[in-house]
Image (cartoon, grey):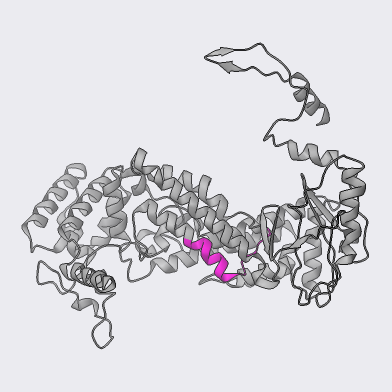
Amino acid sequence: MIDWMRMLYGQMEYRVKSDGEYSEAFQSLWGILAGDSLSPSFFDAYIHDFKPPTLPSDIVLQGTPIGNMELADDIVELTQLDRKRPDLAALQPKVHYTEVEYCARQVFFEMSVPKTRGLLFGATGEPISSLTVADGTPIIFDDKYRYGGILFSNTVGSRLFTPHYTFQADRARNAIYSLFAAEGYTGTIPIQVGLVLYRARVDCHLTYGCEVVIDVNEPGIRKLEKEQKRCLRRLNGVGPRSPTAPLFTETGIMPIRHRRIILALRFAQYALEEPPEHWVNRAYRDVLAMYRAGKKGWMRDMVRALAKLPFAPIALDVSSMESVHGILAVITQVEISCSKYLFNELASTRLPLLHGEDRGLLSDSIQSTLRLRPYLRNVTIPAHRKALFRFLCADHYLAIEQYRRVPRRDGEKIPVDQRPCRYCDACTESEIHALFFCNGIDKLVERRAVFMDRVKAIVPSHKPEYIRDNPIFCVHFYLEHKVLAPILAKFVYDVMDIFPRPERSKGLKEGKKKARAK
């Protein structure tokens, strides 16, 4: 490795381009490549002899005291203090060694005092003494601190990583806004491209630090879930009241809560696979020992996070976390839990066209419930694709959905059979009724006839009796068919144009706006 780096920097040459012409080749014999991934390693190699004094109160990891850590030029020094009477004088020798004996006298660096910060975890009392640099300037102690990309707060427990959740949710939201702002120049983002951009630009913020930050902070993980749903809803053209399960089952994106746990478990697998003398392996064995001793830590948080999974929680046997095979088995359990949760959500009465049983989905198979559905790829016209998705996900203006949100004066819900069609005498204006059975308006009958003619031209054996006997099966047949899916999407788009927002809803909304204005 050292020989390769020496060769890289020894033989590298540069040229300057100006007005389409290049200068003579020259070498740079000073500094390193800006932004090079080797730069942090070079810096760590340069300060390999950085050895602050060891204190009796330093953290001990598998018999080895850990009083400092270095990530390139970001150095952290830590020790344990009395929470009720934290004596900062214990850390003064470390600070003096870092600033004076090492930086100033050995490597000729200058420690950045304005960037030097302190953090007291869970301290209930005021510090006995102040911590100062060589010129007597006191080091400022904050209520939150960032190291290695993770934001810590000075509050112990589940709120330790509250600033981290907030920060990452804000970054994900900004990435979402930037992603869809491009539609003003490129047009509607295709579903495949949108999912690639989500994985590249949004998912990285939602999962950042998941191997360290286990999701026991419920308000924190909900912030990340909110941003994930915001992105997928915007991509598929549905509103904030739409059911959440189709956002995942139709696109193949895993809910962020399950995904973060799986990534954390894979990190545990990596830690076990490292040699016993590796620090990450030592740290993992230490959290196992802490759990057995009844102390708080990473493993206890993992047990709590698995027990809080929706619909299908997992009771973790920690002994399974002591082997790679056992961890892989837990990952499989999380995938099955995710599949069962989504399958159960699809069984909602709001989603009559997406029930798992009608589509041949398996409740315990993540490959069955979580994949990009063919119709989202085959329907290439954005307006038709979004209209179809809204129709399937109950994000439409049909009476069966709109009257679900409007109770009677006595507060009771309006029964399904009392949500009448606007164009005929049917007692329920449902999705299937609007598509195949409503004959109350000529425009709809004409569009339906055109749709059936196009279907029969592609599948001559298809008969109207099939729709009358099993309309939901026919809808799924159209969705899975490469050629019929765009035809169905166009028909749904036309139907939704015929069944617009009810005038009563418009008047109610305008009345609320006027009331707010007054």
Reply yes or no: does residue 215 show up in magenta: yes
Residue at the image point whose x is 44% and y is 65% from the top: 343
**Residue at the extreme bottom of the image, as rendered:** 410
Which corner quadrant of the image does residue 381 belong to? top left
Name the quarter where the C terminus is drawn: bottom left
Q: Residue furthest left?
A: 442
From the viewer's perspective, is residue 159 above or below residue 283? below
Q: Is residue 259 above or below residue 199?
A: below
In the picture provided, is 290 more to the left or to the right than 154? right
The residue at 36%/38% (across/down) is: 185
Residue drawn at x 27%, y 70% is 517
Residue 66's x, y, as percent? 86, 58
Q: Is residue 58 among the parts visible in the rendering?
A: no
Say whether residue 487 is left or right of residue 139: left
Query: Where, by quadrant of the figure, is residue 157 drawn?
Result: bottom right
Residue 127 shows up from this direction: yes
Residue toward you, 343 or 214 = 214
Expressed as whole percent of the image width and height from the top left, the position of residue 272 reads 76, 55
Q: Where in the figure is residue 23, as x and y percent of width and height?
A: 63, 12
Q: Horizontally, is 390 left or right of 156 in the view?
A: left
Dominant SS of magenta comes to: helix
The residue lying at 42 percent from left, 52 percent from top is 251
User: Considering only vertical position in the picture, is 201 above or below 366?
Assistant: above
The magenta region covers 212-226
Tell which of 295 and 149 is nearer to you.
Answer: 149
Q: Quadrant of the N terminus?
A: top right
- Front-lying residue, 183 or 404: 183
